[in-house]
Image: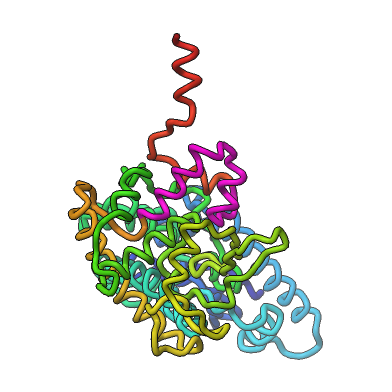
């Protein structure tokens, strides 16, 4: 009488503790095997019950699949036993394999999969996202190679235990801060989600994982300090004056990021339905559309530059680069953003401001000023181009909130 069973190839256990699972077919002293296309931790396998143990975080999903496989195999055995032809172990294997279908490609290799999906960001010219994710994936690959001595990682190897080990590696080996660790875990989660969406992975360990984060103390320029920078006596043809114009325009438009200032074209500046001149742009970081009216100060900065055709750059940051050349645009922005931050530190020193100035402080300053004066978190969200109020609240977290000082003093009076 033919029998089927599910067994762990413990003799094939890798350095990371994972071993392949296969279906065993025995008939009249002959054995045949069918690979099931995935691996489990050898330490979490119950050979008597032919399933993973309860300590496995995804034991239900695994055991449901194994039960279905075994049921399908036993059904094939019953059909073959009722047939008029001679039953052999080889024929049984063929019939079972036909019913099971080809094994899913779930065993190998998450690292290669993630790197292939990473390339999609480069092809879509999402260069900043590409480089950020690439850095984190390289860190994860180093972790896998250093801790487990392997260059391939089964999709199903990414469980809670492994993710927690990666977290420890980031802290103890790479000496990362909490927010840097959180960013690496967020990146890993992105690619695990992609694997799940494509049917490559079976389990989702991040439902048990808390992403690391800690409050960041943010530098802030107040309106008086912005005015100090604006009032500096500079040669208007100098690079310092040029950077100041970029920085102040960012501030006056509610905190436009450097990448958005750089890619601003004259077609983005036009009258709105209200009659006010407005600036409209698609944020490079989030792809959200934003539009705000131009203050007199912002319009004064624009008058320094000659109007060009619709597709011309407003500011000379990307001068000489075609709007269609995404790679060149990214490289120039990255280079000049660093130069601009160096110039802003010089401007802050000249203005007597003892703070670590950077271009992003224009966005911080605008966010804080809007929050103090508008006092409507929903409007501030729209001005900043955030997708939710919660994002705005997280962004403002860490700034001193003086909007309720009058209420406090009156109450304590």
- Side (left or right) of 203 relative to 132: right
Residue at x 53%, y 78% (from the top left corner): 35
Q: Position of residue 156 (x, y in %)?
A: 48, 66
Q: Position of residue 287 (x, y in %)?
A: 56, 68
Q: Along the line of sight, which residue is nearer the eye, 148 or 2?
A: 148
Is residue 387 within the magenta segment? yes
Q: Along the line of sight, which residue is nearer the eye, 134 or 393?
A: 393
- Side (left or right) of 216 relative to 38: left
Q: Along the line of sight, which residue is nearer the eye, 51 or 305?
A: 305
Is residue 76 within the magenta segment? no
Residue furthest top in the image? 413
Specify the quadrant that holds the N terminus.
bottom right
Specify the quadrant that holds the C terminus.
top left
Q: Looking at the rendering, which quadrant does residue 144 occupy?
A: bottom left
Q: Position of residue 298 (x, y in %)?
A: 48, 61
Write down the region rendered in magenta: 361-388
Residue at x 59%, y 62% (from the top left corner): 290
Q: Position of residue 94 (x, y in %)?
A: 65, 87
Q: How is the image coloured?
A: rainbow
Q: Along the line of sight, which residue is nearer the eye, 27 or 313?
A: 313
Q: Looking at the rendering, which quadrant does residue 76 occupy?
A: bottom right
**Is any atom of residue 113 visible in this view?**
no
- Side (left or right) of 216 relative to 305: left
Measured along the vertical axis of the image, is residue 79 above or below residue 378?
below
Q: Looking at the rendering, which quadrant does residue 402 occupy?
A: top left
Query: Is the stretch drawn in magenta largely helix, strand or loop?
Result: helix
**Is any atom of residue 409 visible in this view?**
yes
């Amino acid at each position: 009488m033919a029998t089927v069973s599910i067994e762990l190839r413990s003799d094939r256990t890798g350095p990371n503790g994972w071993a392949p699972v296969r279906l065993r077919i025995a008939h009249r002293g002959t054995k045949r095997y069918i690979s099931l296309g995935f691996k489990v931790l050898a330490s979490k396998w119950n050979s008597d019950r032919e399933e993973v143990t309860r300590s496995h975080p995804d034991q239900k999903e695994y055991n449901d699949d194994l039960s279905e496989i075994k049921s399908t195999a036993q059904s094939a055995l019953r059909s073959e036993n009722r047939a008029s032809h001679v039953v052999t172990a080889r024929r049984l294997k063929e019939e079972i394999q036909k019913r099971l279908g080809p094994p899913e490609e779930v065993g190998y290799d998450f690292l290669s999969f993630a790197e292939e999906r990473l390339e999609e960001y480069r092809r879509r010219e999402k260069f900043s996202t590409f480089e950020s994710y690439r850095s984190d994936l390289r860190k994860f690959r180093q972790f896998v190679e250093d801790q487990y001595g392997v260059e391939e990682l089964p999709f199903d190897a990414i469980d809670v235990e492994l993710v927690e080990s990666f977290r420890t590696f980031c802290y103890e080996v790479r000496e990362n801060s909490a927010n840097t660790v959180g960013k690496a875990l967020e990146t890993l989660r992105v690619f695990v989600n992609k694997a799940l969406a494509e049917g490559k992975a079976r389990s989702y360990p991040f439902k048990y994982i808390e992403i690391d984060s800690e409050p960041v103390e943010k530098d802030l320029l107040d309106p008086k300090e912005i005015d100090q920078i604006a009032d500096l006596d500079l040669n208007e043809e100098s690079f310092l004056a040029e950077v100041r114009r970029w920085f102040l325009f960012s501030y006056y438009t509610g905190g436009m990021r450097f990448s958005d200032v750089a890619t601003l074209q004259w077609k983005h500046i036009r009258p709105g339905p209200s009659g006010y001149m407005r600036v409209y742009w698609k944020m490079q970081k989030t792809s959200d559309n934003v539009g705000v009216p131009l203050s007199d100060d912002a319009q004064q900065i624009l008058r320094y530059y000659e109007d060009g055709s619709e597709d011309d750059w407003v500011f000379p940051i990307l001068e000489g680069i075609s709007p269609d050349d995404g790679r060149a645009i990214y490289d120039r922005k990255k280079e000049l953003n660093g130069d601009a931050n160096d110039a802003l530190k010089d401007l802050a020193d000249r203005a007597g401001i003892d703070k670590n100035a950077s271009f992003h402080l224009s966005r911080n300053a605008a966010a804080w000023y809007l929050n103090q004066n508008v006092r409507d978190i929903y409007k501030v969200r729209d001005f900043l181009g955030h997708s939710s109020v919660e994002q705005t609240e997280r962004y403002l977290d860490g700034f001193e909130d003086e909007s309720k000082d009058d209420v406090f003093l009156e109450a304590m009076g």
